[in-house]
Each structure stands twice: as structure tokens, then as C-alpha cells.
Amino acid sequence: MNAHPDQTGDAPRPSGDAHRDRGPRQIVVGVVDERSRAVISVAAQYAKAFHATLTCVYVESTMLALGETPQGSLYAAGLAAEIDDPVFPDDLRDVVTEGVGGTPVEWKAVARRGTPTVELHEVAEDVDALMFVLGTRKPGLRDSMREFINGSVATQLSHRQVRPVVVVPLCVVGHDDDLPWMDDSEG
């Protein structure tokens, strides 16, 4: 009696397993500043649970979103012409190391330059990431204006690509308190 093809162990794997052929699973983490330590800690927990490694991405944002075309494409302007390759700052490497802590999770640093949403998406495509892990923004007028102009990275990623986006709350407020973007202070 011949075994059913699915019982031989030689059956084709679903396409979702393709990333396993390219190395370990990856989780893309947005790294912005020292507050990213909490985001990285949560990402490390996910990485441990999924037997994944972290791809920690720092984006030097040199683009300013100006608007959206009727077709849904964003258009932007460059703020500075940089010649040198972007560099992952040493102080953020320390933040990543502290965020990963004593977990056995491996990580790598990637520095990009451009629009954060686009660069994070491209890195995720390059490594066939399982998901994104991002933090909420800082309260304050400057960051509120930046988000108003450029849009929320987490919101844009959740609508413009297929991977799950985990958002780690960094500025938790009570139900009766103003939300961070409603505060006019400089944070």
C-alpha cells in the first residue's frame, strides 16, 4: 500500500514557509530614540516566541510628505541632499542591546534614509518579515505637527502592506485625560 503524498513528508510546503528557506524569521522594529527600548523589549518577546531575529531599523527621515494624489499615491519633497550612507547611531545600538536584555534573541541594525513608512516596508520586503513592531509617538507640539504632516507610520503601514503591525503604547493616559496629540505642550 502506498502512502498518501501528504504523509510522506515530501509534500510541497505552503508558500507562507518560503521565508524559512532564506534563513531565520525576521521581525522589523522601528528604532527612533531612547524610548524605543520598551518597543524593542516587546519585540524581543515576540521574537523569542516566534523563534525569530530582530531587524532593528533606524530611518533618517529626509522627506516631508506634501500630500496625496487622487489615486492614493503620496508625494513628498526632500529636506536635505545627503551623500554619505546613513549610519545606525551608536547610542541607539546601546538602546537595542538594553531592550533585548537577557533574551537569547539575535538582532541586526539597519540604517536607511528616506520616508520612514517606505523604508520600513522595503526592509520588511527584503527580509520577508513576519511583522512590524513600532512604538507610539511622543506627546508634544513638535511631534504632533510632524505626525500631522507625515502621517502616523503605524497607520500607514497597516493600510499599505500585508504584514501585521504591533503598536507598543509609550504614552499611556487615563480614559479621562487628553490624548497625546491633544496636548499643546512641548513634551
Image (cartoon, rainbow, N blue to C red):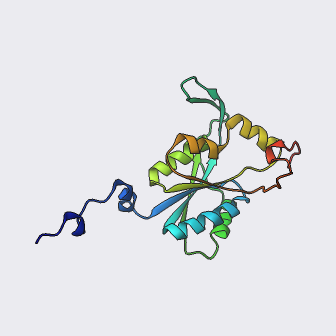
The quadrant holding residue 17 is bottom left
- Asked whether residue 12 appears in the rendered view, the answer is yes
Numbered-mark total? 0
Task: Please determine whether, in this image, residue 146 is positioned above or below residue 138.
Answer: above
Work out whether residue 82 or residue 23 is closer to the camera in this orientation and state it.
Answer: 23
Give the x, y percent position of residue 95: 68, 64
Left or right: 38 in relation to 176: left
Left or right: 176 in relation to 13: right
Give the x, y percent position of residue 16: 38, 55
- Residue located farthest toward the front when viewing the structure as drawn: 1
Query: Which residue corresponds to the image point at 56% horizontal and 41% vertical from the top-left?
Result: 159
Query: Which residue corresponds to the image point at 60% horizontal and 63% vertical from the top-left?
Result: 43
Work out whether residue 41 or residue 177 is closer to the camera in this orientation and state it.
Answer: 177
- Residue located farthest toward the left when viewing the structure as drawn: 1
Left or right: 20 in relation to 172: left
Work out whether residue 97 or residue 8 is closer to the camera in this orientation and state it.
Answer: 8
The quadrant holding residue 90 is bottom right
Give the x, y percent position of residue 184: 87, 42
Task: Please determine whether, in this image, residue 144 is positioned above or below residue 51.
Answer: above
- Residue located farthest toward the right when viewing the structure as drawn: 185
Work out whether residue 6 or residue 49 is closer to the camera in this orientation and state it.
Answer: 6
- Asked whether residue 106 appears in the rendered view, the answer is no
Query: Which residue corresponds to the image point at 62% horizontal and 30% vertical from the top-left?
Result: 76
Task: Please determine whether, in this image, residue 102 is positioned above or below residue 12.
Answer: below
Query: Which residue corresponds to the image point at 86% horizontal and 51% vertical from the top-left?
Result: 176
Left or right: 32 in relation to 114: right
The quadrant holding residue 1 is bottom left
Give the x, y percent position of residue 166: 61, 55
